């Protein structure tokens, strides 16, 4: 089964929705206009249930099949944009200064709306499809908010699937993998407390800048010398702040950064060692350290059976040669991970072709991907809920 005729026929309409959303980006949970746009479309399609305000500003539509009662399969798209000034130069560029859809969530939302329209018209399945539109993927944990709001239980969702565009992956291609596909993302803040003084008399001080320099170097051993090379971990010190004058040694230096991991045991180890290394280095120099470690999105983990199923669907839509089934794990993070912790499912990537990278000010979603994305969602739902 190749790209659906209906998906190709609705491409222009779905692209118009996408470009409207692109012109009116909203960030985090403040996606009220986007959520209203989505809800209005779902009601116009004739969805049996349309509920808003789930996980604060999320939207869920329920489409019942005409073949009777059965399981409920969830299909998820994200709605939020990023705080970036757009430089794409497109006619449909952002009309909101300082905000833009730089990750393609406008495309994800539009493609799932297209699938919802088709499924509401045909209803060629047994059971129900839950189309899930999530706020605050970009650092706000909207996926967790919807799960905590009881979404899975309220709508009886038994499986859940997600999709994200991928610049550099050819148009019409898909990619995924079983197991860990995207990393856990944690953040930390370290305060090194020394004793400030005159820069010409360092012997009368405990220099927190020097201590921080040793700590930064030592932290890299967590990845390079303490972790199995086959178990990925990234330890990044992203900022260092201390002092205001060139002739004054400060009292305190602050470091901030992120740790990315693909396995729970690696995550636990890196968190523990960060604190041990920083405190040990500080003690060596007579300083004192404070560590504030914040766990973010967990590992996005694809369930085996559901990923095999998703691979079959991608092959039906795009052909076997256009489907990568052993994609190298990505060290970026994705809060669809919370939904995959709550229910079995799978997360896949769809090709965006030769475009700017995600989160770049010149990025734009490729509207030519729309028929493939709509076809994937429709084929997945109708196959999973075959009468």
Image: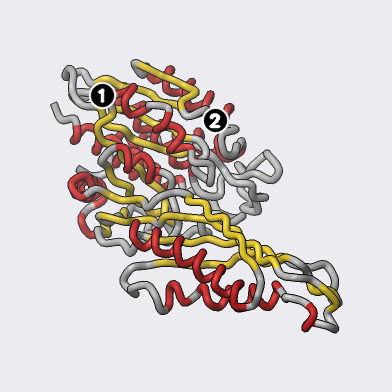
Element marked by disc 1: strand
Taking the image as shown, residue 2 lies to the left or right of residue 195, namely left
Residue 168 appears at what percent x and percent y?
Answer: 42, 61
Residue 384 relative to residue 358: left or right: left
Alpha carbon separation for disc pair 2 and 1: 24 Å
Q: Which mark is residue 325?
A: none
**In-image side of 171 versus 294 (left or right):** left
Whether residue 139 is situated above or below residue 321 in the rendered picture: above
The picture quadrant where one finds residue 150 is: top left
Which residue occupies the foreground of this view, 53 or 35?
Answer: 53
Q: Is residue 95 above or below residue 293?
A: above
Name the quarter where the C terminus is drawn: top left
- One can see residue 13 in this view: no
Q: Residue at x 56, y 34 (%)?
A: 29
- At horizontal 21% and vertical 44% (from top left) the residue drawn is 306
Disc 2 designates what residue? 34
Give x and y (percent) for residue 276. 50, 67
SS at mark 2?
Answer: helix
Residue tagged by mark 1?
128
Is residue 264 something that shows in the picture?
yes
């Amino acid at each position: 089964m190749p790209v659906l005729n209906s998906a190709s026929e609705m491409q222009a309409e779905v692209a118009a929705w996408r470009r409207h959303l692109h012109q009116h980006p909203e960030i985090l949970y403040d996606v009220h206009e986007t959520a209203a746009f989505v809800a209005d479309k779902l009601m116009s399609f004739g969805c049996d249930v349309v509920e808003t305000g789930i996980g604060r500003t999320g939207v869920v539509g329920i489409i019942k099949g005409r073949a009777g009662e059965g399981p409920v399969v969830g299909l998820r798209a994200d709605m939020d944009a990023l705080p970036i000034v757009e430089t794409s130069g497109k006619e449909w560029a952002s009309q909101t200064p300082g905000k833009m859809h730089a990750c393609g969530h406008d495309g994800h939302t539009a493609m799932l709306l297209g699938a919802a329209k088709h499924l509401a018209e045909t209803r060629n399945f047994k059971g129900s499809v839950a189309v899930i539109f999530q706020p605050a993927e970009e650092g706000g944990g909207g996926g967790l908010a919807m799960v905590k709001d009881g979404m899975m239980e309220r709508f009886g969702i038994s499986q859940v699937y997600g999709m994200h565009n991928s610049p550099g992956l050819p148009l019409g291609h898909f990619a995924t993998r079983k197991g860990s596909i995207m990393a856990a993302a944690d953040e930390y803040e370290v305060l090194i407390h020394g004793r400030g003084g005159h820069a010409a008399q360092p012997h009368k001080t405990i220099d927190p800048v020097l201590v921080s320099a040793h700590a930064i170097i030592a932290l890299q051993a967590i990845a390079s010398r303490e972790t199995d090379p086959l178990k990925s971990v990234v330890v990044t010190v992203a900022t260092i702040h201390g002092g205001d004058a060139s002739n004054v040694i400060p009292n305190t230096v602050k470091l901030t950064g992120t740790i990315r991991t693909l396995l729970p045991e690696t995550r636990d180890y890196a968190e523990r060692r960060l604190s041990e290394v920083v405190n040990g280095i500080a003690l060596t120099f007579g300083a004192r350290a404070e560590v504030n470690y914040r766990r973010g999105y967990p590992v996005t983990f694809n369930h085996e059976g559901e990923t095999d199923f998703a691979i079959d669907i991608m092959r039906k839509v795009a052909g076997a040669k256009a489907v990568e089934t052993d994609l190298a794990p990505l060290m970026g993070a994705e809060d669809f991970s919370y939904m995959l912790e709550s229910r079995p499912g799978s997360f896949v990537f769809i090709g965006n072709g030769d475009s700017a990278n995600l989160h770049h000010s010149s990025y734009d979603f490729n509207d030519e991907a729309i028929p493939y994305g709509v076809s994937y969602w429709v084929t997945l739902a109708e196959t999973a809920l075959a009468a």
